[in-house]
Amino acid sequence: MKPYRHMIFVALTGLLSFSVCGSEPEPNYQDLELLRSQALAFIQHLPGLSTNSHLSVGNIDPRLKLTPCTNIDFTLPNNSNQRGNIRLGVRCLAPQPWSLFVSASVLESKTYLITRTALDKNHAIDKQDIIATEVFQTHTPPGAISDPQLILGHILAHPLLAGSSIRMTDLLPEPSLTRGQTVKIVSKGNGFQITRTGKLLNNTNSGQKAQARTSSNQVITGTARSGGIIEMPAH
């Protein structure tokens, strides 16, 4: 081998040796996906979960560089109801302490009633008008009703589109006086009062118009009052 070729070979060999011997191992950090899996396993053991519970753990910031942990502790905030969106505390106890919060959600399946078709104002709700739909709790409309017995036979206060949730505020209040009940008809004048009885001819509430039929078959119109009273001015 010629002298200059030998010198180049030695130089390249030296550089290769320096590159291999001088390199440092990649730093070892906590596996964040493993941490998420461990957090999910923790919430899967919360009490009272059903087979329909929906559990999830949010992503952990990939920029975090945490020392690998051999002893991890998961905790829930004080007074946590363990449902809905929660912040899960994560602490490394060994070998090097660190801590962070992880977002998680524990959602339960909820059923509420919606209209099958569009319904008009003053419509009396029937079984055929409603269907039950299932969602997770954070998606349930405020005030939505799940028990059909609370609304069957009730009158709509305004129209509803098909697929609308039904709330108590969508319904007219139950009448405080109902058709057919015996009422006291009170006629008041200047310094006198006449009282008689009759049968109510319409459902109504206190303060609203009411009609009643007396024992003499006379139909009178007055104002409904609490306590089964129809008040009318004396003539």
Image (cartoon, rainbow, N blue to C red):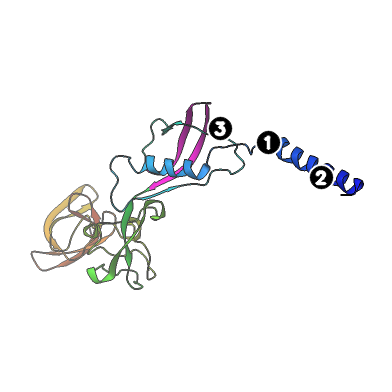
Instruction: Name the dominant secondary structure of the magenta segment.
Output: strand
The percent coordinates of residue 125 (x first, y second) are 26, 67
Local secondary structure at mark 3: loop
Amino acid carrying mark 2 in the image: Leu
As drawn, 66 above or below 50? above
Residues at discs 3 and 1 in contact (Cβ within 8 Å): no
Tell me, for residue 12, which label it has, or none: 2
Q: Nearer the viewer, residue 2 or 146?
A: 2
As drawn, 161 above or below 11? below
At a point 46% along the width and 31% down the height, the residue shown is: 70
The percent coordinates of residue 209 (x first, y second) are 27, 61
At a point 59% along the width and 38% down the height, the residue shown is: 64
Q: CA distance from mark 3 to mark 1?
A: 18 Å
For this view, does 212 lie left or right of residue 103? Answer: left
At a point 48% along the width and 30% down the height, the residue shown is: 91
The percent coordinates of residue 71 (x first, y second) are 44, 30
Residues at discs 3 and 2 in contact (Cβ within 8 Å): no
Q: Residues within 10 Å of mark 1 (few under 14, many from 20)?
A: few
Q: CA distance from mark 1 to mark 2?
A: 21 Å
Q: Residues within 10 Å of mark 2 (few under 14, many from 20)?
A: few
The percent coordinates of residue 147 (x first, y second) are 25, 57
Give the mark nearer the N terminus: 1 vs 2. Answer: 2
Instruction: Tell me if residue 85 can be seen.
Output: no
Provide the residue designation for mark 3.
67
Magenta residues (range): 83-106
